[in-house]
Image (cartoon, grey):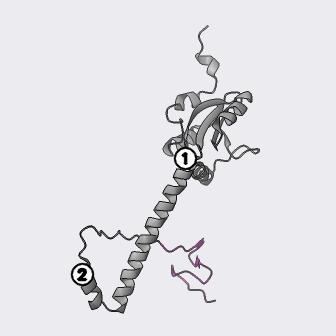
Amino acid sequence: MTIKLFTPCPDDDGRTPMSNKKFVAPKKKFAPIDRSNMDFELEKAKLDVLDETGKLNLVSKTSLTLCQKMDQVINDLEIIIEALVNTVNYTMINDSFNLIMIGVSSDWDERQKKHKKKGWITIDAKPGSLKNEGMVKDVIKHVGIKPIPTSTEIFQITPELVDILISLQWVGVKENKNRILTKDHQISLDY
């Protein structure tokens, strides 16, 4: 292996000499071909005129567009399947310990009863997916906020975490921001 000094080109193992980060080639995006007004006879005549490189480019554009459409169909199917399974994304808080729980459940009624017995207060629950929860947890992890040691879905309530959840449009956080961030609920009571 030869090291290429002072160039942004990747080495054999994928690193660049300028940094230890792996080199990732950017993905090309291709606009889908509009077939609604297409004259197929004219397109066939164009294919006869194209050289081998042009034909290969056309085939690659068409296959990439097809792959993108298939990815979109697969994502849509995953969402439909999760919706049919009655998956719910939820937010709960525990006033005693100043904690927030973000989670997903396919049996929401049982999950809610179980958590209420342990002192959790439901903020909101809406249809969602495991994929949504995973994406939110990945962002939280990337920012550097860690869950409490015994869980992957319970976090200490902080303004930074609440702002992240609001920006990701997590269930019920935006509507209940003040309620979530109020540490001592007894202060607001009048005697």
Q: Which residue is mark 2?
A: 41
Q: Position of residue 175 (x, y in %)?
A: 49, 32
Residue shown at the point (73%, 44%) measured from the top left: 151
Quarter containing the C terminus: top right
Residue appearing at x 51%, y 58% in the figure: 75
User: Where is 48 relative to 139, above or below?
Assistant: below
Check disc 1 and give the amino acid type.
Answer: Ala
Q: Label 2, label 1: how many angstroms apart (C-alpha)?
A: 44 Å
Say whether residue 13 is magenta: yes
Instruction: Please give the residue where the numbered disc 1 appears in the rendered image.
Output: 83
Most distant residue in the top direction: 191
Where residue 88 sits, quadrant-wise, is top right
Q: Amino acid at mark 2?
A: Glu
Other-residue count near label 2 (Cα within 10 Å), few / some / many at <14 / 14–19 / ≥20? few
Q: Main secondary structure of the magenta part?
A: loop
Query: Circle 2 sits in a helix, a strand or a loop, which is it?
Result: helix
Q: Which mark is residue 99?
A: none
Say few, some or many: other residues with alpha carbon within 10 Å of mark 1 (under 14 / 14 to 19 / 20 or more). some
Q: Residues at badges 2 and 1 in contact (C-beta under 8 Å)?
A: no
Q: Nearer the viewer, residue 106 or 3?
A: 106
- Judged left or right of residue 137, residue 26 is left
Q: Which residues are the magenta region?
A: 1-27
